[in-house]
Amino acid sequence: MQRTEKTKLRRAKKRKSSSTRWLQRQLNDPYVQEARRAGYRARSVFKLEEIDARFDVVRKGRPLVDLGAAPGSWSQYAAKKGARVVALDLLPMEPIEGVEILEGDFLEPATQDALLARLGGKVATVLSDIAPDATGRRLVDRLRAEAVGEAVVGFACIVLEEDGQLLIKLVKGAETAVMDIARPHFARLRLLRPKATRSDSSETYLLASGFRPASATVTETPD
Ligand SMILES: C[S@@+](CC[C@H](N)C(=O)[O-])C[C@H]1O[C@@H](n2cnc3c(N)ncnc32)[C@H](O)[C@@H]1O
């Protein structure tokens, strides 16, 4: 990643020092600069790009669902690579060519129903970069991340085609619970920390590959 000259901000009277620090970090972050140069809406695209280069999670011509998609860099990347993308976020998103966008809370059953209706069939890949609002209280944040993770695994089990892949962002500490839920349904689980993840971030990505649909329904017969 190319480094450019460091920008130092003078503290503006009305800006809090935490906002100044955030802005300074953004301005000096090579991934932010590179994303801007390449026309991507967020630096997080480099996390997906790195994982995709190793594990081929975004497949040309194949359907993919991107959860927690705003502002949209993962969807941009996937559409550019030729995947058929349906994106969902709580927040409105600017249109992206080749991407169908839905707005809603993934944790609401009605939103998941709308998403399933829009997908209209199985998908090769489920991506979730959903980041629940952080409270700063470690236990609460971990439980929230677990709840989202468990909901995403449940949704993936409905919508993934055989051998499909699931990539999901978690915070450290939430991996065990989410992996326990995912394990019976996938051939392989990997925990990944892409280079673009900030060094002070507690995020980690779970890649679950080789989806195994539940075997044919067991019909119970009376004794
Ligand atoms: C880190 S951002 C995603 C960045 C995105 N991957 C990109 O490349 O542009 C996390 C997103 O998760 C969304 N989010 C958080 N909770 C959600 C929920 N319950 N349902 C849908 N989206 C949610 C947020 O609104 C936010 O846009």
Image (tube, rainbow, N blue to C red):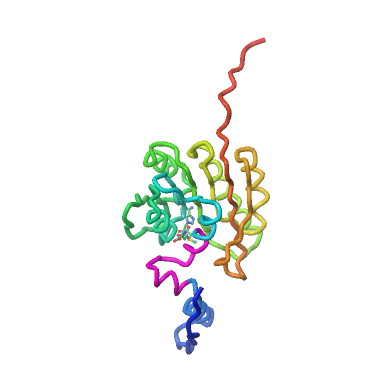
Q: Name the residue at the top extreme.
A: 223
Of 44 and 71, which appears nearest the observer? 44
- Coordinates of residue 140 in the picture (x, y in percent): 62, 58
Image height check: is 123 above or below 142? above
How far across and how far down the image is residue 37, in percent?
Answer: 39, 72
Q: Between 118 and 45, which is closer to the camera in this rendering?
A: 45
Q: Left or right: where does residue 28 sit relative to residue 187?
A: left
Image position, residue 135 (x, y; %): 58, 63
Residue 92 or 160: which is nearer the viewer?
Answer: 160
**Residue at 56% from the left image edge and 24% from the top image edge:** 217
* Residue 73 is inside the magenta segment: no
Q: Main secondary structure of the magenta part?
A: helix
User: Can you say whether 34 is above or below 66 in the image?
Assistant: below
Say whether residue 41 is magenta. yes
Q: How many numbered circles are shown?
A: 0
Q: Is residue 94 visible?
A: yes
Residue 141 seen anywhere in this rendered image of the structure: no
| Residue at figure coordinates x 53%, y 60% from the top left | 50
The correct choice, above or below, for 90 with respect to 117 in the image is below
The residue sitting at 42% across, 59% down in the picture is 70
Q: Quadrant of the C terminus?
A: top right
Q: Position of residue 88 (x, y in %)?
A: 41, 51
Query: What residue range appears in magenta?
Result: 32-48
Give me the residue at 53% from left, 80% from top: 21
